[in-house]
Image: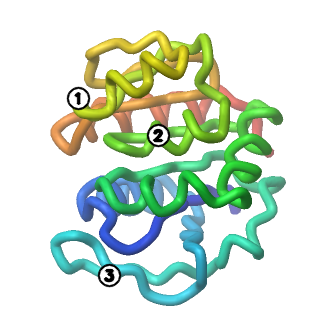
Amino acid sequence: MMKVLILSADEFEDSELLCPMYRLKEAGYQVDIAAPEWGQIKGKRGYTVTANLALDDVQPDGFRLLLLPGGKAPPQKLRSILQVQEIVRAFADKEYLVAAICHGPQILLSAGVLVGRRATCYRDVATELEAGGVLYEDSEVVVDGNIITSRQPSDIPAFMGEIIKALSYYPNR
């Protein structure tokens, strides 16, 4: 079974985690969710999902995609965790697919994988990305090699379209 990893924490933007999770499951992927500790995490609007992995359990090999949903809180909580940065760098260094939406690109910025790359994000984060050496584009989805970024919930159809397309291009891992 092909596997994808969603990395999140409490206060995630419900649609940015749930819509990709269900779309990936529909496409036949096993979706694992990792959080600082395994167990339930709760979205901003009250939906819950079960993180079946703690950060300590994450082994990037075997996954085809790392997805980082937004909501302001998870990126703020996760971006400063060294383990999270190491996971992101491991995916990026091996040229596995990495996708981030809304505030999610802040985690990519903290991990140092966006410098000199094209990306988009939620409008309130754009200045921070530009200051960090990112070539910001205000588009519903931006694909730069193995990194896919998007701005907000209304962009999820375009975001997921590019993710599904990219998953079919990249060899099975």
Inspect the image, locate mark 3, and give the three-letter code of the amino acid beneath it. Thr
Which residue is drawn at the image coordinates 16% and 72% (left, top)?
Answer: 45
Give coordinates of residue 54: x percent, y percent: 66, 78
Residue 123 is labelled as: 1
The residues tagged by marks 1 and 2 sit, at their Cα atoms, a distance apart of 12 Å
Q: Earlier in the sequence, mark 3 or mark 2?
A: 3
Give the CA distance from mark 1 to mark 3. Answer: 26 Å
Q: Nearer the viewer, residue 19 or 165?
A: 19
Residue 106, numbered circle: 2
Question: Is label 3 or label 2 in front?
Answer: 2
Marks 3 and 2 sit apart, C-alpha to C-alpha, by: 23 Å
Q: x%, y% of residue 63?
A: 72, 54
In the picture, measured across the screen, residue 132 lies left or right of residue 57, that is left
Q: Quadrant of the C terminus?
A: top right
Where is 79 relative to 21, above or below?
Answer: above
Q: Where does the image place residue 153, in percent across and percent down from the top left?
A: 21, 44
- Depth order, front residue of 100/11: 11
Q: Position of residue 150 (x, y in %)?
A: 35, 32
Give whichever of discs 1 and 2 has the lower sequence position.
Answer: 2
Which residue position is annotated with label 3?
Answer: 48
At numbered mark 3, what does the secondary structure look like: helix, strand or loop? strand
Q: Are marks 1 and 3 in contact (CB under 8 Å)?
A: no
In the picture shown, does residue 64 fall above or below 49? above
The amino acid type found where label 1 is placed reads: Arg
Q: Residue at x 46, y 54 (%)?
A: 24
Mark 3 Cα within 10 Å, few/some/many (few <14, many 20+)?
A: some
The way the protein has been coloured in the rendering is rainbow
Q: Quick check: can you spot residue 26?
A: no
The residue at 22%/70% (across/down) is 44
